[in-house]
Image: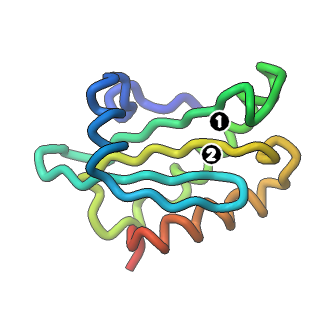
Amino acid sequence: MRFPRKQSINQSEDFLRIRKTGQAKVGRFVIVSTLADPTLTSIRAAFVTSKRAAKKAHDRNYIRRRLRACLQAHAESFTDPKRYLVTIARPGAAEASFGDLEADWLTQCKRLKLFP
């Protein structure tokens, strides 16, 4: 399923603001960054997979699909959906099982207090 365009982050200024003023937690397979913004109507998300995470484009797309599935499955449980969320894949994410990747993503989100 395609991630809705109006829920994606596509402005470089937003990425810089999230990077400078937001919070980030580092896990084994992902880095999750977040920034609350009361002007948003819903969550805005981005998924970054570099060539360091996976050499082949097929694997990078596979990682992004899995991370989108994690967000779509758990987004309604967020305490405050008015926020930016950036997930960066780390090396080894392509070899990880979906369960391990989802568990790591959930752990970092809980560390950022995104869930009650």
As drawn, the residue found furthest toward the front would be 20
**Measured from the top left, where is residue 8 in percent x and y?**
39, 31
* Residue occupying image coordinates x 77% and y 43%: 91
Q: How many marks?
A: 2
Residue appearing at x 31%, y 53% in the figure: 22
Q: Are marks 2 and 1 in contact (CB under 8 Å)?
A: yes
Q: As rendered, which of 50 and 67 lies closer to the eye?
A: 50
Tag 2 residue: 67
**Mark 2 to mark 1: distance in Å?**
5 Å
Residue shown at the point (82%, 24%) measured from the top left: 55
Q: Quadrant of residue 98?
A: bottom right
Examine the image and state in which quarter residue 15 appears: top left
Quadrant in the picture for the C terminus? bottom left
Residue 74 coordinates in the image, percent (x, y):
51, 61
Q: Which residue lies furthest to the top in this view?
A: 57
Determine which residue is flagged by label 1: 64
Q: Residue at x 66, y 36 (%)?
A: 65
